[in-house]
Amino acid sequence: MAGSKPTLENQLRKMFAGPGSGLPCSYCHELIQPGDVEYEIVELGADGLQARQPALRVHMRCYRLWSAAQGR
């Protein structure tokens, strides 16, 4: 897992989980396969509406690593 790890500027966020989309993980950059669980983490604006869609797409295991690194 080389390179910089993703960060979110805003603490307001929503998270969704579902089957992998086949797109790359924002954390490890490997493809998230349909058999994997994919988390989509979306930042919210000050008004509570989505600022970006999605901010991050990550594997379940990568979410755990990212979350621990964020101190959550």
Image (spheres, helix red, strand yellow):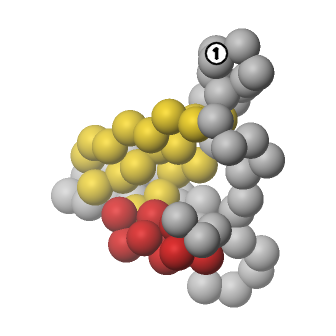
- For badge 1, the amino acid type reads Leu
Q: Quadrant location of residue 61? A: bottom left
Crowd band around label 1 with a 10 angstrom C-alpha radius: few (<14), some (14–19), many (20+) = few
- The quadrant holding residue 12 is top right
Q: Residue furthest left?
A: 35
Determine whether 38 is above or below 67 in the image.
Answer: above
Quadrant of residue 69 in the image?
Answer: bottom right
Instruction: Work out whether 49 lies above or below 38.
Output: above
Furthest residue to the bottom? 2
Looking at this view, is 37 or 11 the one in front?
A: 11
* 41 on left or right of 38: right
Per the image, label 1 sits on a secondary structure element best described as loop
| x and y, in percent, of residue 46 in the image | 76, 21
Q: Depth check: give the residue in front, 29 or 55.
A: 55
Q: Is residue 56 above or below residue 52?
A: below
Residue furthest to the front: 72
- Residue 31: image location, x then y, percent: 45, 63
User: Is 10 positioned to the left or the right of 16 in the image?
Assistant: right
Using the rendered image of the protein, determine whether residue 34 is visible from the camera's viewpoint: yes
Please name the residue shown 48% across and 58% down the image.
Answer: 58
On the image, the x and y values in percent for residue 48 come to 64, 18
Residue 67: x %, y % from top left: 52, 66
Q: Is residue 47 above or below residue 69?
A: above
Quadrant where the N terminus sits is: bottom right
Query: Visible in this render: residue 31?
Result: no
Look at 73% across and 23% down and name the residue there. 45
Mark 1 lies on residue: 49
Q: How many marks?
A: 1
